[in-house]
Amino acid sequence: MTREDHTEITTTVTFDLASDHPVPVDVELRYDTRDPFAVYALFEPEGARAVQWILSRDLLADGLIVRTGDGDVRMWPDKKDNELVVIEFVTPKGQARFEAHAQDIADFLDTTYEVVLPGAEDEWFDFDAEIARMIAAG
């Protein structure tokens, strides 16, 4: 497969919004070789507006093993249940903490690695085209 042969991988997993009464939220994870460093997470809570976050693929992989992230997304293994990970989103308007099954995320990442190996993302990303696009956008 070459940079011109693009692939998109999509799966839906359930994250639980952490609270006294956890709320399950369907999250569509999408990986596109046109943006090989990123995973798009579309949160579709029942009865609420969908929200999309762009996550680093490396952050998702690292967060399965250790606490990672120092910006608006943080992730770490759950200390009480090694089958879960915690993903926290922080914005100026508040924060949300979710729990997810680590295996669901690992399986999704494994599928992305079949297309683009870790460390080979730059072979798929056209830096010149992205710079030209940013310059044109002003």
Image: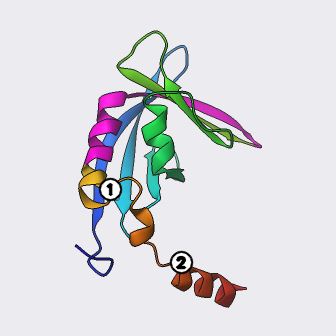
Q: What residue lies at 60% left-to-right and 88% top-to-bottom?
A: 132
Residue located beneath label 2 in the image:
127
Q: Read off the magenta span.
A: 92-110
Kind of residue at badge 2? Phe
Query: As displayed, is residue 98 above or below residue 53?
Result: above
- Seen at 28% across and 58% down, the residue is 9
Disc 1 crowd rating (10 Å Cα; few below 14, some 14-19, many 20+) is few
Residue 121: tell me if it is visible.
yes
Percent across and percent down for residue 77 are 47, 23
**Residue 73: x and y, percent?**
61, 41
On the image, the x and y values in percent for residue 84 come to 40, 22
* Label 2 element class: helix
**Residue under the point 44% across and 54% down:** 39
- First in sequence: mark 2 vs mark 1: 1
- Disc 1 residue type (three-letter): Leu
State left or right for residue 85 relative to residue 53.
left
